Amino acid sequence: LLQVMESGGGSVQPGGSLRLSCTASGYSEKLNCMGWFRQRPGKEREKVAFIDGALGSTFLDPSVEDRVTISLDSAKNTVFLQMDKMKPGDSATYYCVADTRSIWYGSCASRHYTTWGPGTQVTVAS
């Protein structure tokens, strides 16, 4: 059974940086898609970033694309989310997702994910 677990959340001051990690387990092959959603207080869950393990292509939401980098260690099925110049509006619970299905199921950013991590809390405040 494919599972994912996030780590690296915490508190950071505005303008600071944070790096989230997410490792998948229960699957021995390379994952095709991994990524991140977030849910801010009182808001709906929203897309942040995704990476295609086969093609290496990435998707970053326009709201964060100048401050966020997503990368993947395929050998370890671990995805990283590097967030810089953070703002209070980045405060949220960040969720990792993963999908084993091939590219024929669409882009990583457009998929319906059924494998979610429990989430990691990020707080940006002075």
Image (cartoon, rainbow, N blue to C red):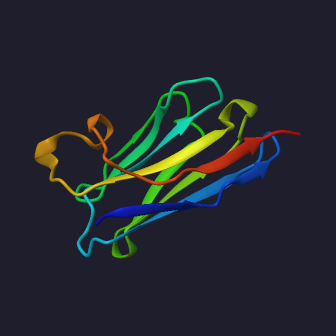
Residue lying furthest right in this view?
126
Q: Specify the quadrant that holds the N terminus.
A: bottom left
Looking at the image, can residue 83 be seen? Answer: no
Q: Nearer the viewer, residue 108 or 25?
A: 25
Instruction: Measuring from the top left, give residue 37's x and y in whole percent.
Output: 48, 40
Looking at the image, can residue 85 be seen? Answer: yes
Instruction: Measuring from the top left, give residue 82's x and y in whole percent.
Output: 58, 53
Left or right? Give the position of 95 relative to 24.
right
Q: Is residue 49 above or below residue 74?
A: above
Q: Toward which corner of the image does residue 27 lie, by quadrant?
A: bottom left
Q: Is residue 113 above or below residue 28?
A: above
Q: Specify the quadrant that holds the C terminus.
A: top right
Residue pictured at 66% horizontal, 55% vertical: 9
Left or right? Give the position of 31 relative to 24.
left
Q: Nearer the viewer, residue 28 or 54?
A: 28
Residue lying furthest left in this view?
104
Q: Is residue 7 above or below residue 123?
A: below
Q: Is residue 25 above or below residue 33?
A: below
How many discs mark residues in the rendered view? 0
Instruction: Measuring from the top left, give residue 57's x and y in whole percent.
Output: 31, 49
Residue pictured at 26% horizontal, 76% vertical: 28
Instruction: Measuring from the top left, give residue 114's x and y in whole percent.
Output: 31, 47
Residue pictured at 58% horizontal, 24% vertical: 43
Left or right? Give the position of 4 relative to 122.
left
